[in-house]
Amino acid sequence: MDERTLEQIIAQGTVDVVIDDYGFTGEGYVRLADGWLSVHGTLPGEKVRVRVDVGEEHGRRIFGILEQVLDASPERRDPLCARDAVCRGCQLRHVTVNEELGYHVRTVREVIEKFAGVPEDEQPHCEIITPQPIARGDAFRIRSALTYRRTDDTCELGLNTPVQEALVPMFDCPALTTPVRRLVATVREAFMELDELPWDEAMALRARDEGAEIAPAIRTVSVASPVIGRGFVDVRLSEIAGEDVLERAITEGPVAALVARLEEMLPDEVGLAVSVGERRAHLSGPERLLLPIAGLKIEVGYEDWFPATIAPSDALYDALLELLDLREDDAFLDVGTGIGTIAILAAKRVERVVGVDINRSSVSTAELNAVANEATNAEFVVGGWENALRKLTLDGQRFTAASINPMREPLGKRALTYLKALGVRRLVYLGPSPASAAKDIGELRQMGWKLDHLAAANIHPATYHTMLVARLTLD
Ligand SMILES: C[S@@+](CC[C@H](N)C(=O)[O-])C[C@H]1O[C@@H](n2cnc3c(N)ncnc32)[C@H](O)[C@@H]1O
């Protein structure tokens, strides 16, 4: 706690403060008399010098920029990254692994108290799920989306940061695995060799404001590669260049020159596509990417969600199976099945499985993956949470155990009500947004479900992202 007001702090320009605690995105913060000062890259208990005159303001919270650590926490470590101070893509790279794991456990415990209504002293023990062993400096990410920006005579590809104007280059990013770093480097080289650079989105917006004709412009380049020589490159165009932008981009002009160069440079087993919104032109290489997930043969298409890390996700799947404790006579429901990984893992242990997902393309992928992995007792249903679960209920289907793995939104009370009607009595919730997951868990508790196990999965090491894992049972 600092007795000064926001106004007094801002007037000083640079201030020395002692950090109170972590905020929601891994930043440190100090409580002020009438607001908060948040500072990325700081740890609780540290005395730091902070520039506040350049910071962003969000209501009564201001973000300052760390100038100097005056009194370091014993949990501070070398981030092993030259750009950590400006990038902020990894919010916890500067802390010890133990501190990082403690951060995730605290996040889970706090949201369960706040949103699920279970006081911390009444919660089950919260375990940590993480790849073993893990050390600071390990790289895990197998995919990255690079923002494209053009200047007069050159271009940048990298990550937007809150701290500096320039994009942070990713070809040597320590969070990315070697295969994906290599692919990023190849993409960058292809851009650098062009005689004429493609437009970026800012150029297209300027042309639109001036009433000029808009050329195809690149927004981002998405790159994924689980092993060297295999991967995806997806050049994503700005939607403001009109209906026919995809056709124009791949037949003429600088984007066409870029993809021609990429076709020459990319290894044979790297797929290349150009896309805009939901539309995509696949140009070369495979249309599906084989991922070594959970000991299965899992293939994904460009449209599918797939894990950004392998070893941490494998640790999560192992823990999930242990928590589910599946039996041969179980009927299992996989809610948010995506590419079908959990459904297929469960299918090998139970009588039958149904996977549910709103993404039609992922459900097709899940069906192919089930065949490739001989999961003949798994079937899949396309639909939103509520509709799909209602349909299964009306069909008279019955299950004994389930998993729920949504994106960042909660399922909500109406969808969750169907679980009981479907006969489910054992449930594991994997929540990539801890607060949303805790809201759903609060709803389930109101319906009589008991929270009997909690865990925090560290599936994006060195970042603030926590996967909340909870097991619930119904008598
Ligand atoms: C985190 S991914 C699931 C990952 C999958 N369980 C796995 O282990 O690979 C979340 C899934 O929820 C699906 N989803 C998002 N909103 C949905 C909704 N309203 N109804 C049904 N599925 C939805 C997405 O299509 C996505 O496949």
Image (tube, rainbow, N blue to C red):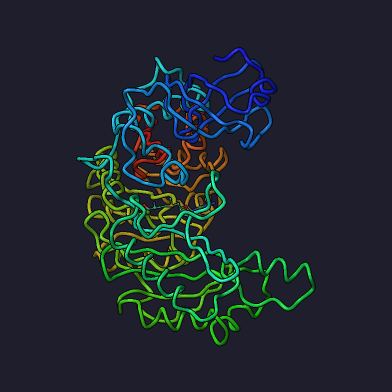
Image quadrant where residue 356 sits: bottom left
Q: Is residue 214 above or below residue 451?
A: below
The spot of residue 102 in percent (x, y) is 34, 27
- Residue found at x 46% / y 59%: 145
Can the viewer see residue 119 in this picture?
yes
Q: Residue at x 42, y 22 (%)?
A: 46
| Residue 469 or residue 269, whichever sits in front | 269
The image position of residue 31, as x and y in percent, is 57, 19
Residue 453 visible within the image: no
Measured as percent of width and height from the top left, residue 169 is found at 44, 57
Between 258 and 110, the residue placed more toward the observer is 258
In this view, the residue in front, 111 or 52, is 52
Q: In which quadrant is the C terminus drawn?
A: top left
Q: Quadrant of the N terminus?
A: top right
Position in image of residue 56 (x %, y %): 63, 37
Question: Is the residue 5 above or below the residue 371 in the image?
Answer: above
Asked whether 90 or 171 is in front, the reply is 171
- Asked if 51 appears above or below 326 in the picture, the reply is above
